[in-house]
Image (cartoon, rainbow, N blue to C red):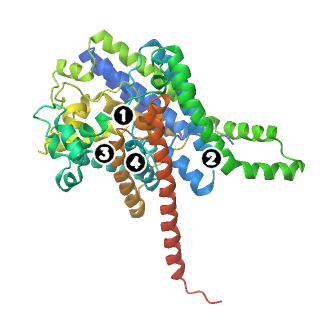
Amino acid sequence: MEIIIPRRNIIWAYIILGFFALISVATLAIHEYYIYLSAYLWFGFIYGMCLQYGRFCFASAFRDLFAVGVPRMVVGIMIATFLFAITSALVAATGWSTFHAAPVSIHAVIAGLIFGVGMVFAGGCASGSLYKTGEGNGVSLLVILSISVTQSLFVDWGGILNKFVPASWHESALQKGLPDSINVADGWVDQYLAGYVWDQPVRTYAQSMGMQDDTLIGAVLGNTMVGVLIPALIILAVVYIFWVRKNYIRKLQAEEGKVITFQDHLNGFWGMIMASKRTSIAGLLLGIACGLQMFVIEGLRMKFGVKNAGTILERLGHDFGISAKGTVFDPGYWYVTTQEAQWVGWMLQKLGLNNMDNIYFGWVNGIPSPAINPADWMSVALIGGAAVMALLHGEFKFKAPTKELAFWAILGGFFMGIGSRLALGCNVGAFFVRTANGDMSGWLFGLGMIGGAFIGVKIFNWYTERKMAKEMAGFDLDL
């Protein structure tokens, strides 16, 4: 059945597209440096369109799998991760990759566990909440706000939390030689980062096999085949065995009444994979876009003679919110959560709260104005790209949150915010991008996230069943 798209949807899609085009043209007329920010903007727009098209949400994937046994989204995400890894490997082999691996330790699993619980509570992961906001979903907007506020407050929180800082963390953090402007001894997260996380090894699968990440054999064989394909196949096999196999066998026996062979299982496995075409296509496009963004951003850095956007902002006269080492958050590829935390951090700084005395804002990411923050442009444009795709598919609709959904959104965002900071990234930065680039910490976060999603589904089901029982008890049934 053909869907008729209202004319107003098409008009609004053109308005959104025109708005972003106007920003690019107007800022480029001011100075050529703004093309750096526009690059982030247009890649964000592409990411938003891809996410909305593929309904690409990690929370939905694991909720559907654990709650109702539907594997489509999980399968699609695994395939998308592998397709993204191929693109990442080709970029890495050229030496133009902007990716940096993260420290590897048990903290990634714990952080993933907390994040996984939160995303199920919220009904959307970090990236999923962004694109759903573009669809007009008010609950998703609350999730983003909750994640952002939680992060910006959590990274500067000391007080009673400092009593739980191990002495080894404290001593190690003080030995890092951070400037006096960073009060490392006064913040739990600062001591966690400088005293523990920074001391952990940073490894990719290629490096662990004695290869280099920027060689074809290291990028393809080490990081993609060993680091992505094998783990993804194992997860897909587990999904098939525990969630797909039984129904598939029952269907075959009902239709043909034959003995099931290994070839039948291979056909069932392949059928499971092919059922996730839309998510896989979206993942492929995301991977291509991420790879192109690395090329473009690295090329612009070479053109302007910079290593970080902080230098560009300083040259433009925007020195407020630049970190102590002259940088701002400038990953060079798709990322979520950090730039949203910067929005809140910038606002709180303007309201008088010193947010530049911690490592997260003051030493690493900065809090430049959202108006001239490259990663902020990417997130705003992502919402816009999702809105355009939703409008053109007749899927845009304003949805105000109920009190109950608002509660779960805020609670879920709270857990995701904490998990993101402990892992140095969310389902995108700590899992999708890291895993696809052969970072060994990616699958650790992923395993924790899967476990957290399972726990979250169990808790949510318990809550739902208890609520229904109370509601049914209110009925006076005469039998």
Label placed on residue 103: 1
The mark nearer the N terminus, 3 or 1, is 1
Of labels 4 and 3, the one closer to you: 4
Q: Residues within 10 Å of mark 3 (few under 14, many from 20)?
A: many
The mark nearer the N terminus, 1 or 4, is 1
Label placed on residue 110: 4
User: Which residue is under mark 3?
Assistant: 148
Amino acid at pointer 2: Pro
Amino acid at pointer 3: Ser
Task: Answer left or right for 269 relative to 308.
Answer: right
Mark 1–mark 4 Cα distance, whole angstroms, equals 14 Å
Viewer can see residue 368: no
User: Which residue is under mark 2?
Assistant: 71
Q: 22 or 224, which lies in front?
A: 224
Viewer can see residue 204: yes
* Callout 1 secondary element: loop
Q: Residue furthest front?
A: 168
